[in-house]
Amino acid sequence: MNTPRTTLLLTAAILLAGCGSQNARQPSTPAPSQSGTAIRVPVSEISSTTGRYFVELEGDPTVLGAQSLQGQQASFRAQVARAGIRWQEHSSYQRLFNGFSVSVTPAEAARISRMPGVLSVFPVLEIERPQAMLEQGASETQVQTAAGLTGATYVREELGLTGKGVKVAVMDTGIDLEHPAFRNRVVAGYDFVGDAFGSNGNTTPVPDNNPDDCGGHGTHVAGIVGANDPTNGFLGVAPDVQFGAYKVFGCEGSTNADIMLQAMERADADDMDVLNMSIGAAFQWPSYPTAKAASRLAKRGMIVTVSAGNSGTSGQYATGAPSLGENVISVASIDNTKLELGVLVLAADGSRLGYAVATGAPDPETGLSLPLAKAPGSTPTTANDGCSVNGVSPYAPNSLEGKAVLIRRGTCSFREKALNAQAAGAKAVLIYNNAPGVVSATVAPSLASDNVVIEIPVVGLTPEDGARLDAAIGSTVTFTGDTQLFPNITGNTLSSFSSYGPSPDLDLKPDVSAPGGLIKSTYPLTQEATGYAVLSGTSMAAPHAAGIAALLLEKHPQLASIDGNARRLFQNTAVPGNYFLNGSISPFVDFVQRQGAGLMNAPAALAALESGVSVTPSKIALGESEAFPTRTKVLTLRNNGAVRQIYQVYHVPALAISASTFAPQPLTVAATVSVNGESAEIAEGGINVSVAPYSSVELEVTITAPTAPVRGQYGGHIVMQGVTGVDLSVPYGGLIGDYQSIQVLGNISLPGYGLGTTPRNFPALFDGVEGQIYFEGATPTEKPVFTLGQVNVAEEGEEAAFVLDIPRLWVHLAHQSRWIEMDVLDANGNLLDTVSRDEYVGRNASNSYTGPTSNAYYTWSWDGTLANGNAAPNGDYRLRLRVLKALGDENNPDHIETYTSPVFGIQRP
C-alpha cells in the first residue's frame, strides 16, 4: 500500500511536458565547481507525476441529503472556464463526494484551490497493487484454523448462518467468474479500467461490464469472504453471500484513487450491504477523499471493511486511506497457526526444512539438487546480506554458477537480493528471516519500467533453518516437491507486516484484527491450475471481517442501519492479543495502536447482539497528554435485554511504543486507570457493576498517562468481564507529552544514489539538469540557474531524455503535516507570492532512499508561475516551505517549521 515518492508529487510539482523550449540549457560537462553534491538520478524519477487532482466543492454529496449537485457543478465548470484555467475532467462525483477528478498543471491546481466554492484540492494518489505475499500451497487444516481463530466456523457450522441474502462488494482486481466457488453468484459489478490498464505505462481506462480477474488478488479476497466449492471441500467465511465485483486494477500495475472513488459510488448505487477494500494509500489522513467517501458509505448504512495496510516495517502513523475513515472498520492482520510448506532436504544431516515460495518467482522443480553457497563473510547476523553497496553487487560474476545461495533478510529488498544472485549465476535463492517465522517474500517488480524477470526459485525460511544451512555451506539441498505441515511460531499474533496507527489526528486505528497471514483461498484458474493459493497481507484480514459481518447480517439486518453500529459491536467483543517476543508469545498485551480492540470474535459478537449488551464509545482516543495528563471519559454500558447483567470491570494495560516513528520499540510503561473513583487495576480486584434490564449505567473512566517517553504512545483496554453474559471491552490510547514536538522536516540517507548511509540535511534544492543537490545549510559557490525549458540530459550516444529545467525541492516528511505552503521570495528573503498550499499531507515511508520504491522524499517544484497565473520575470529568487504540524495551531509559531532554499536564478532564453 505504499505510494512511491516518484508518483506523489504534490500540488507544487511540475509535469515533464511543461512550458519552455527544448534544449534551452545544455548540462555542463563536467559540472561547475559548486558546493552542491553531484548526484545521478534517472530521468523517470525526476519527472514522474500523475497530474491528477481531486477538486472538492462546498456542500454535501447526495448520500448526505443533497437533492442534486448538477447545477452547482455546471456553474463551477463555467467559473473555471471564465478564469482561463484549462483542465481535463476525468470524473465527476455526486453520491459520496461533491466534486471532480481533473488533470491540470500544478500551478492551476493551486489557483483552483483559492476559488470561491472550493473546499479542498488533493492530489489523486497512485494506488499500488496490493503486495500480498504468495506462499506454497495449503491444506484444509489451514483453512479451518484461520476461520476457527475468530469463531466464524462455529457460527457457520453450529448456528447455521452462511450469509444468505447478503450482498458483498469486493473492490479489487475483479473475480474469476469461471471459478466453481463463485459460479452464478456475482450479481453486480463493473470493470472500471480494462485488462491493459497499469501495464507498460498505460493509464487510459477502457471500462466494460466484465469484471473478470486477471490479477489474482481479488479472487483470493472474494474467496475468503464467501467461496463455496464443495467439490474441493473449500468454504469461505460466509459461503452463501452474493457478490458485487468492482474491478479497479488491470492485469498488472497500479490504479488511481479517483477510480476507487468511482467504484465506491457504483457499489452504493448497486445497494451493496458490505464493501471490502483490500487496497489503499498508506500514511494518509482521514480527510483524504477515499477515506471521506468510505465514511459516508458507513453513515448511509453500508458496512465497510478495509485493510489497515502492510507497512508494519515502516513504523508508526502508517495506516492508510480509506481505512482511516470514521466508522470504517480498519482491519489488522494476525498470523495463521498452521503452515503447509514446501520441503527441502539438507544432505549434511537429512533434516527436512520448510520453505515458502516468494511471489514473483517460479516454484522449484521437484528433485532439484544444488550445492549450497553464500556471500564471502556472510553470517546469521549480517544486516545487508546480498545487498548492493554503492551500486556494486556483493557477488563476483559467475561466482554462484549452478548453486543455491543462502541470504539473510535485511536492509535491501528481496528483489534486489534475488537479482544480484541471479546475475551471479545462482540457480536458487534461499532467504532466511531476521525475525521469528518463515519469510513471506515478494520479488515481483513494483515499477512498470522494471521488466527484469526472476527466472530462478526464491524461497523463504525461518531464522533457525537459515542458521542450520549456514553451518552446512558446501553441502547439498534438494527440493522434494512435497509439502508438510509445520507449526507457525507466530500463530495468533500480529503479522510483522501489519501497519501501525494511529491516524495523524490521533484517532485509534486500526479497529480490529483478523487472520491475514498465510491464508488459503481461491485463485484464478488461468494462473493456478488447482484454483487455490496461499497469500499473506492485511488484504486477507479485511475480507475475513467482511465475511463475519455477512454472517451476522443474515440474521440481524439492522446491524448496518445505524452509523458505526457494526464497528462498535466488533470492537466491544474483540479479544486483545499478546505480543510476540524473542521467539514466543509474551505475557504483554500487544499495542492498541496496531491491533485495535483485538481479534474479532464472531460468536461473542452474535451473543452481544442478541442479548442487547453494548458499551459506547467503542474506543477512547485521548490525544496528547501535555496539557491534560489526566482525562476522564464516560462509557455507557447498555443492557437492552430482559436479563440483569453483572460485570467485573478492570484495566488491562497494553505495551507502550517508543517515540521513534520509523523504528518503534515496545515499552512496559502504562497508564493508571480508575472507574467511578475506584482503582480498576487487576491487582486491586477491579469494580463490580450491575445493569438492570432495559437500562444503562455510566462509567466515569479516569486515565492518567505515563510521563515517559515523550512522544511515545500508550494504551490498554477497559475490560467488562461478564459474570452473567458476554465479555465486553474498550481500547484506549494516547500520546505522551507534546504532539507538536515531533519534527516534520527530517533528514534522510541516500544510499540509493551512492551517497552512503550517513543522514543528509534535508530539505534540499535539486538541479536535475546539472545533477547537483544542495543540502540544507549549503551555500552554492556558483548560483544555480534554471531556464524553465526542456533540456536533453542524455550522454553522447544515448537516446534523448528530456528534463524540465526548473528548481525542485526534495523534502523528507518524517511526520504528517496539516498543510504545507510554498512561498516565492526575492533574493533578499522578502515574500513575493504564495504559489501553493497542500492540505493534509501524508508522511514518507522511510528515512533512507534505497531505490525508486523507497518513498523516502517528496518533490515540490516551481515552474516560474505566480498564483495569479502570470509568469515571474527573470531574476533571482528563493523558495520557502512553511509546514504546519499535525493538529497544530497556525497562530503558534512553535507549530510551524520553515525551510528556505539558497538563491537561484530564473533565466528564460
Image (tube, rainbow, N blue to C red):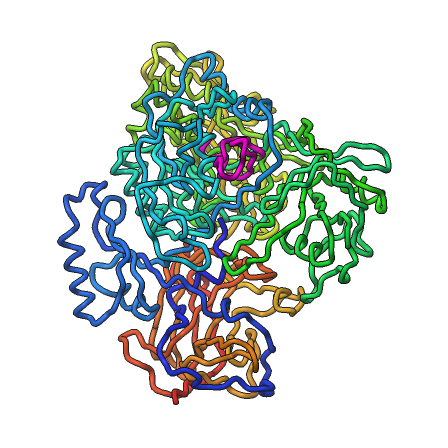
Query: In front here: 699 or 451?
Result: 451
Chain part drawn in magenta: 518-544
Front-lying residue, 261 or 183: 183
Q: Is residue 416 above or below residue 307?
A: below
**How far from the left and from the top, in percent, is residue 804?**
43, 76
Based on the displayed image, in which of its 4 quarters is residue 88 positioned?
bottom left
Residue 589 seen by the camera: no
Residue visible at 26% across and 35% down in the picture: 270
Quadrant where the C terminus lies?
Answer: bottom left
Given residues 831 and 787, the one toward you in this image is: 787
* Residue 356 appears in the rendering: yes
Q: Quadrant of residue 489 in the image?
A: top right
Q: Is residue 696 above or below residue 453?
A: above
Horizontally, residue 29 falls left or right of residue 299, namely right
- Is residue 304 found left or right of 425 in the rendered image? left
Which residue is most to the bottom? 909
